[in-house]
Image: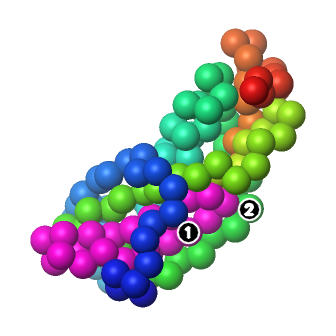
Amino acid sequence: MKDEIEPSGKLTIRIVAMPADTNPSGDIFGGWVLSQMDIAGGVAAVQRTKTRVVTVAVNAMTFISPVKVGDVLCIYTRIIKIGTTSITIEIEAWARRDRMAVREKVTEGHFTYVSLNDDGKKCVIED
């Protein structure tokens, strides 16, 4: 998958994978990658809804390739569905490796967020 396809969506977060984020095998924890994706999805959801949002579901998640220390993790987001109170975001994580010479998709998923008002109750997503 190296450099064969382009990321889908808008670049939302870029972060360097650090040694503190590794598992005993030396790869970056999948949970760390998942949390970065959730943060990016939340940013995209808030930008669209202009409300507070909470994650209600990770509808699909596929780990394709490990993330290594020093990789620049780039998270891309694309809105795929807007309901009455929820929004589903397609999220792709790509790693820039070897001093950014190689770009490889490492993870993808669909996350759903619910729009909340100031009282923490579900609210309608306006057009």
2 relative position to 64: left or right: left
19 relative position to 118: left or right: left
Image location (x, y in percent) of residue 33: 44, 62
Dots 1, 2 in contact, CB < 8 A: no
Image location (x, y in percent) of residue 98: 16, 77
Image location (x, y in percent) of residue 66: 39, 79
Q: Which mark is residue 66?
A: none
**Distance between mark 1 and mark 2 Cα atoms:** 11 Å
Image quarter of the C terminus: top right
- Mark 2, residues whose alpha carbon is within 10 Å: few (<14), some, or many (≥20)? few
Image location (x, y in percent) of residue 49: 66, 28
Q: Residue at x 13, y 71 (%)?
A: 99
Amino acid type shown at disc 1: Glu
Answer with mark 1 or mark 2, whichever residue precedes in sequence.
2
- Magenta stretch, main secondary structure, is strand
Q: Which residues are magenta?
A: 90-110
**Residue 41 magenta-highlighted:** no
Q: Which residue is mark 2?
A: 59
Can residue 38 be seen here? The reply is no
Looking at the image, residue 40 lies above or below residue 107: above
Picture quadrant of residue 114: top right
Amino acid type shown at disc 2: Asn
